[in-house]
Image: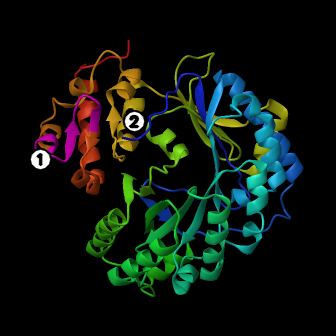
Amino acid sequence: MLPFVETTNHIHLQPSMFIGPTVKDAAHTATSISISNSRKSVNHERMKQCLIKEAQTLLQLSGVEKITSVFFGGGTPSLAQPETIKIFLESISKHISPHSQTEISMEVNPTSIEMDSLREFKAAGVNRVSIGVQTLNTEALHILGRDHSVQESLKCLEMAKSLFPSHVSLDLIYGWPGQSLDMWLAELKEILQICDHHISLYQLTIERGTQLFKSIQENKLKLPDSDVTEDMYLQAVELLDQNGFERYEVSNFAKEHCYSYHNLAYWTGVDYIGVGPGAHGRFIPRDKGQREARIQTLEPDNWMWEVENYSHATRKCIPLTMQDQLEELLSVGLRTKSGVTHFASSKICPKRSIEDLLLHNQKVQFYIHKGLLVLDNRGLKPSSEGMNIIDSILPDLLIALQDANNTAIYNEK
């Protein structure tokens, strides 16, 4: 059973350190992007002061008392100066228990400039890293527009394992042009010989307007067929299981319960604050009483100006209705092994149970009857077979939820 984080007076904080282009990841996909590796164009002192100022403002607005995890993500956060991370964490330290196991994690690209700072990031307070290895194929790294080498990936991994034992995650991409099933399985077996306790797998998707998109459109490169990428995923799940990795979310695998707690925060509906350019958050402002989706200004220069003048740079606040919140909970929660608990659902919709909301739908009943979904005294979750096709199941669940809303099976009053 996965750990469940109680949200009362707790929060997941996500400072977004945008030092390069932004990456938008779907739950089971990754995008091809080239990341700048230069620190010179960044005013680190100004960025640091703005991060601290915005974090303090949003913490006060949320009324939170305890931070359960901190995640430095977005762009290339490891290109930030370690001193920025250190001072930022010190500024929020009163919200972190000094004896707690608070996860403080960071995304890292395995370039030499970032590798050199790993020890300093640990000294600054980081205790978990996620390394964007992507692939151990040199040609594929070039196709994907990555600016690190296979040798750098291997060196970075060994260094990270020595600094953060059992707290290193690898991000891998499969389904890139020219990759066969045998190539993927051989690469994954090689990874399993050297990895730590966490692996994330993402199928490549192509962004319009990129060089990779253009090359595929012009038939210069060819993606694997869909049945091949399906086999890549299913055989990877089997191989990882044989090597002690638990699939606790569709794309995430952990050995010895070394889960990513910032990911669990998203998937279980925990409130989180997004700080920094383009960051996203979900929390209940204490002056409003309704959960909001909050988006910070994307452009770093504009973001800093707004923070300096208004104490935060929240560009958009979207009040989330009960329907919105339930849809989000189902969409992310049912991608996990533990699914959606009755407790989490009842916090959003206290008057109606999961059964009331979904079991009126014949397709939902069919999925349960076929063993693809399991409804028990803890909640609703996918079976192992159900996780394999959860993207096909979720639309029917969301339709069932919408039907419940339309027929007034539940109301928001």
Residue 246 coordinates in the image, percent (x, y):
37, 55
Measured Cα–Cα span from mark 2 to mark 1: 23 Å
Comparing 292 with 356, the one in front is 356
Is tag 2's residue or tag 1's residue first in the polypeptide sequence? 2
- Name the side, left or right, on which 113 lies relative to 186: right
* Nearer to me, 351 or 318: 351
> Viewed as shown, does residue 37 lie left or right of 269?
right
Amino acid marked by disc 1: Lys
Report helix, strand or loop for mark 2. helix
What residue do we see at 46% from left, 34% from top? 269
Local secondary structure at mark 1: loop
Indicate the position of residue 70 as horizontal and vertical percent values.
Answer: 64, 42
Single out the residue that lies furthest toward the top: 413
What residue is shown at x 87% (from left), y 47% (from top)?
46
Residue with the mark numbered 2: 329
Q: Which residues lie in the magenta part?
A: 367-380
Q: What is the number of the mark on residue 370?
A: 1
* Residue 207 seen: no
Few, some or many residues within 10 Å of mark 2 (<14, 14–19, 20+): many
Tell me which corner region of the image, top left, top right, bottom left or bottom right, holds residue 152.
bottom right
Find out whether residue 70 is within the magenta segment: no
Q: Tell me how many marks there are.
A: 2
Q: Residues within 10 Å of mark 1 (few under 14, many from 20)?
A: few
Residue 105 location (% of width, % of height): 63, 50
